[in-house]
Image: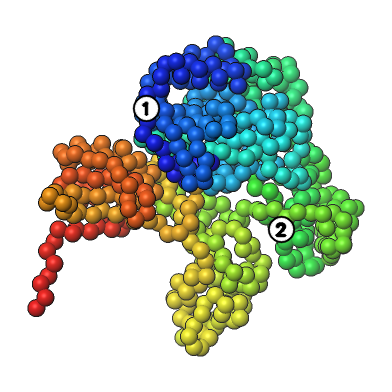
């Protein structure tokens, strides 16, 4: 709904009578009581109409600082923003997923059923409004949407398909960008502490702990269920997170069977292959989730040999050998019923963020670059037995290329590299088939689409995955000093929002540092926010941005006041 700028009209104060009506409507829709009106709708609330480029119109409600708290369209009820749910997570049921899926949602995707983690809240009925959170922080909502399935009746999601939640609003969308302050998801402990102030909140047909904590799911593990039945409460957020990270033995068995089917349908496996090497394929093709949750020891088989023999009984592979010394000699063909019905899924890149990227800096913004293979690289990646539907870091690609050159023996005299057919499709030379080794990688990267992710200062490593990855190279901050009509000198700053800097914050700081008036407008070229300060202050602007963690290399500085050279 807010994938593009909602084109919000000027805000006006929300009348007290309208505020009471809205509060009554929200209390009725979401079955809440004993919550002060000022907690959900402060007395200084504002409202403004919007009409997005997607032809959706409605009303947005904010607090005094323009932080969006509620919104509605002409055809919907009043819906909470994620900021409201950070303060009051029990307002709506919450569907849990993993961090990788959260990243997909922030990029604008809907929540698919296989990405959900059961069990589900009994309020997750078809048509109900739900939040989406990570199982690691079950009360920190990252998205709000409509439930398209009756999830309360779903016990398992593995092997099933369909859209579970149509996302209307998510973290870092254009609704969040209306806030004058920089929004950052709170910690689980902060949300829980906030919520505990309202222990007398009651809801219908929901699981609410005696101490007020919203219980989003029951423990999938039977031992944990027994313990939960005895205690009937989760005393703090860390215990709740621990409960939600347990998977049943049956669930882990299903993950391993699906990983085998993914290997059969998607990987090029050179047969015969030893059991240990074959298990590398299996582990690589596990669905994206915490690797500690899905290990062979947590299956019903406990050992690799027993797992492989069980898969042989399902006619998915054939083995040779005895005991633990097994060799896979053949895999099931496409004629096998399980293989034929299997729907492949996207798996995460083998190397994690910690292995392939630098850690976020404590005093500077960090920019991470990712590369997605284009169609011209398909032959190369097939020859390498690598996937083309994932993002790679520059170091990963360099390692893949160097290993390929070595394995194919492509180095020629004078340290030049011979371009075989797969490399020729990527590195296109005007003539000849050799290139200097120190030049091949820069040419090789031209076969990829670049994306980037800008990491704010002091971002914990576990939160990096949820930051939105944006296509293209990093935009440079435009700093322009010019003279306007009336011989008034101004300095314009734009493209700063990509670096997690809010227009209102920047305007306030420049007003103080430059001792001049500032205003916020819209840049003509790219429709982004633009801050204008009176006077020639390009040096002050640069120093302020550097203090915020930006590098001077990310600036485009233009001074239109300098006299043009006269023609001789």
Q: How would you rate the neighbour count of disc 2 (Cα within 10 Å): few for under 14, some for 14-19, many for 20 or more?
A: some
Please tell me which residue is depicted at 74% across the width and 58% down the height of the picture: 263
Residue 482 image position (x, y, % from top left): 18, 54
Of pointers 1 and 2, the one earlier in the residue sequence: 1
Q: In which quarter of the image is residue 168?
A: top right
SS for tag 1?
Answer: strand
Residue 420 image position (x, y, % from top left): 59, 81
Foreground pick, 125 / 372: 125
The residue to which callout 2 is attached is: 281
Residue 123 image position (x, y, % from top left): 68, 25
Please tell me which residue is depicted at 58% across the width and 33% down the height of the picture: 75
Please tell me which residue is depicted at 12% across the width and 51% down the height of the picture: 487
> In this rendering, does residue 9 appear at all?
yes
Q: Note whether 80 is above or below 304 in the view shown.
A: above
Colour convention of the picture: rainbow
Checking the image for residue 203, the label placed there is none
SS for tag 2?
Answer: helix
Foreground pick, 1 / 101: 1
What is the tally of numbered marks visible in this picture?
Answer: 2
The residue to which callout 1 is attached is: 12
In three-dimensional space, the C-alpha distance between marks 1 and 2, rounded to whole angstroms, equals: 59 Å
Q: Quadrant of the C terminus?
A: bottom left
């Amino acid at each position: 709904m807010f994938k593009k700028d909602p084109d919000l009209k000027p805000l006006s104060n929300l009348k007290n009578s309208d505020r009471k009506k809205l509060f009554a409507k929200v209390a009725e829709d979401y079955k809440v009581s004993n919550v002060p009106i000022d907690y959900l709708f402060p007395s200084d609330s504002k409202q403004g109409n919007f009409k997005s480029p997607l032809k959706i119109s409605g009303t947005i409600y904010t607090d005094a600082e323009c932080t969006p708290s509620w919104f509605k369209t002409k055809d919907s009820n009043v819906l909470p923003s994620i900021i409201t749910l950070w303060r009051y997570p029990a307002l709506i049921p919450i569907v849990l997923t993993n961090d990788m899926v959260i990243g997909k949602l922030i990029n604008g995707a809907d929540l698919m059923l296989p990405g959900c983690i059961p069990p589900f809240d009994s309020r997750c009925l078809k048509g109900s409004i739900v939040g989406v959170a990570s199982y690691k922080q079950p009360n920190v909502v990252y998205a709000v949407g409509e439930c398209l399935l009756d999830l309360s009746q779903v016990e398992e999601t593995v092997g099933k398909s369909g859209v579970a939640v149509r996302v209307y609003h998510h973290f870092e969308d254009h609704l969040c960008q209306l806030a004058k302050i920089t929004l950052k998801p709170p910690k689980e402990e902060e949300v829980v502490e906030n919520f505990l102030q309202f222990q007398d909140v009651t809801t219908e047909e929901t699981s609410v702990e005696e101490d007020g904590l919203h219980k989003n799911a029951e423990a999938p593990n039977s031992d944990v269920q027994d313990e939960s039945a005895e205690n009937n409460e989760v005393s703090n957020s860390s215990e709740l997170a621990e409960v939600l990270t347990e998977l049943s033995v049956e669930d882990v068995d299903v993950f391993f069977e699906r990983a085998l089917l993914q290997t059969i349908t998607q990987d090029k496996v050179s047969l015969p292959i030893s059991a240990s090497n074959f298990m590398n394929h299996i582990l690589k093709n596990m669905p994206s989730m915490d690797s500690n949750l899905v290990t062979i020891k947590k299956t019903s088989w406990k050992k690799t040999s027993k797992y492989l023999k069980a898969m042989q009984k399902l006619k998915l592979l054939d083995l040779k050998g005895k005991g633990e010394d097994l060799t896979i000699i053949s895999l099931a063909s496409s004629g096998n019923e399980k293989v034929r019905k299997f729907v492949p899924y996207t798996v995460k890149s083998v190397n994690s963020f910690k292995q392939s990227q630098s850690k976020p800096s404590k005093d500077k913004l960090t920019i991470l670059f990712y590369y997605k293979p284009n169609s011209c690289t398909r032959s190369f990646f097939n020859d390498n037995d690598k996937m083309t539907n994932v993002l790679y870091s520059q170091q990963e690609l360099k390692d893949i290329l160097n290993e390929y050159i070595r394995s194919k023996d492509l180095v020629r005299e004078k340290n030049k590299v011979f371009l075989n057919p797969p490399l020729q499709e990527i590195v296109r030379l005007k003539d000849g088939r050799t290139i200097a080794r120190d030049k091949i990688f820069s040419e090789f990267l031209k076969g990829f689409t670049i994306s980037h992710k800008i990491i704010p200062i002091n971002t914990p490593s576990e939160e990096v995955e949820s930051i939105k990855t944006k296509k293209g190279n990093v935009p440079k901050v435009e700093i322009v000093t010019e003279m306007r009509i009336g011989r008034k000198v101004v300095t314009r700053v734009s493209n700063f929002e990509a670096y997690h800097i809010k227009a209102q914050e920047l305007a306030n700081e420049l007003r103080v540092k430059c001792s001049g008036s500032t205003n916020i407008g819209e840049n003509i070229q790219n429709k982004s926010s633009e801050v204008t300060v009176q006077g020639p202050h390009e040096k002050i602007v640069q120093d302020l941005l550097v203090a915020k963690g930006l590098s001077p290399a990310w600036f485009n500085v233009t001074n239109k006041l300098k006299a043009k050279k006269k023609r001789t």
